[in-house]
Amino acid sequence: MSNPPYVFIHPMLGPDDAWSAFKTELPIGARSPELLARLAGAPELAEFDQRLPWLFPADSHTNALLKLGERAVIVFDAETTAESAEAQKNLEAQLRQARQKVALAAAPAVKLPASGTWDYVVLGASHARSLPPFSMHGMASRSVVVVTALHTQNDRDWVLANACTLSSGEFLLARTTTQKADMTRLKLLKLLTLIEGDANTGDLEAIFREETKLSYSLLRLVNSAAMSPRSPITSFGQAINLLGRRQLQRWLQLLVYSDPNNGQHPTPLLQKAAARGRLIELLVPCLGIDPALENPGDMAFMIGTFSLLDTLLNMSMGDILHQLPLPEIAQAALGSHAGKFGALLAAIEAADKRDLNAAASQLTHLGIAAETYLDAQLSAISWAAKIRPAN
């Protein structure tokens, strides 16, 4: 029996930039009802917000998805082969009769459906932007409109102005800083250098005394749902005492991605960095890392979280690494995707760019089973989804 193909999970953004849905995708031409059934039965799924929908491809449909009720949205392609058209039509009829949520992935070459005939309509950004004025508003009046393949902030701005409820987040990877940070890039790098250089508590506290908003953001972050302390953490010293230095370092790594203003706005780049760090950490046992490496999980988490610093700081990774002295293994992974950590990071980045065939090939080369990768994604994304600053 051949191994099942990989399933990739992509959080979708709502109008407020929060993760508001999750879309599962497979490499071109691949089907995997087995893994979708595994996902539907995964205990981690109970940890996600039960109100948020999951979009699944119809050609990998399994009856196990029915247990998810309205959370499961089955996506049919407007363009389909003659051989599968009849089967897809029958499945659509069955799902509609069972009152399951159904979606149409529209295609430029196929006429758009009448308004309200589908619960969800999924369009690529270029397709959506080519439509006549107000078409999106008309669709959005009776269907949830989902737009994918947003490669620039301009695409995202257009989506928000045209009544689209959900969008994919590829634009985050190329996004230049749109909010003016209240710390200079130099201070961000100085903080990270102190963290990775095992600086003493006094040196770190000095940074936080200089930047009161930074201290405020840290406390909001460590009091988030992902940490859930028994009682609120109210000072930097208390954070060190309660969390321990190693755990605190992780939160400081994520802190550089936090909202530099009042901490109230969702920060999807922070959650993406957190999910990457946690995913690589969870997959460390599959990589065959040299046993001599101390704390490989910490190294994995750092590589994952720091892999988006170039986007955050709008600098090349080479320039960042020149100013940020990191262990050689991290330098190699971040700078040139070298080593096993680097190869895994390359696979994750390929998946984020929707080059799913390349991502699958790299994961196979690393010996990571599709089931293992799916389970790790669920766990990592579930954890990162809880990182919402406490009020």
Image: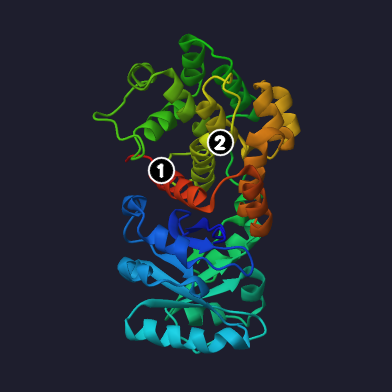
Image coordinates of residue 250 in percent, x first then y, are 48, 28
Using the image, determine if residue 343 lies above or below residue 194.
below
Image coordinates of residue 273 in percent, x first then y, are 54, 41
Q: For residue 383, which numbered disc appears in the image? A: 1
Tell me if I can see residue 332 in this picture. Answer: yes
The mark that comes first in sequence, 1 or 2, is 2
Q: Amino acid at mark 1?
A: Trp
Q: For residue 301, which numbered disc appears in the image? A: none
Q: Amino acid at mark 2?
A: Thr
* x 32%, y 82%: residue: 98
* Residue matched to label 2: 305
Image coordinates of residue 51 in percent, x first then y, are 32, 61
Query: Which corner quadrant holds the C terminus?
Result: top left
Marks 1/2: CA distance? 14 Å
Residue count near mark 2 (Cα–Cα under 10 Å), binned few <14, some 14–19, many ≥20: many
The reply to whether callout 1 and callout 2 are in contact (CB within 8 Å) is no
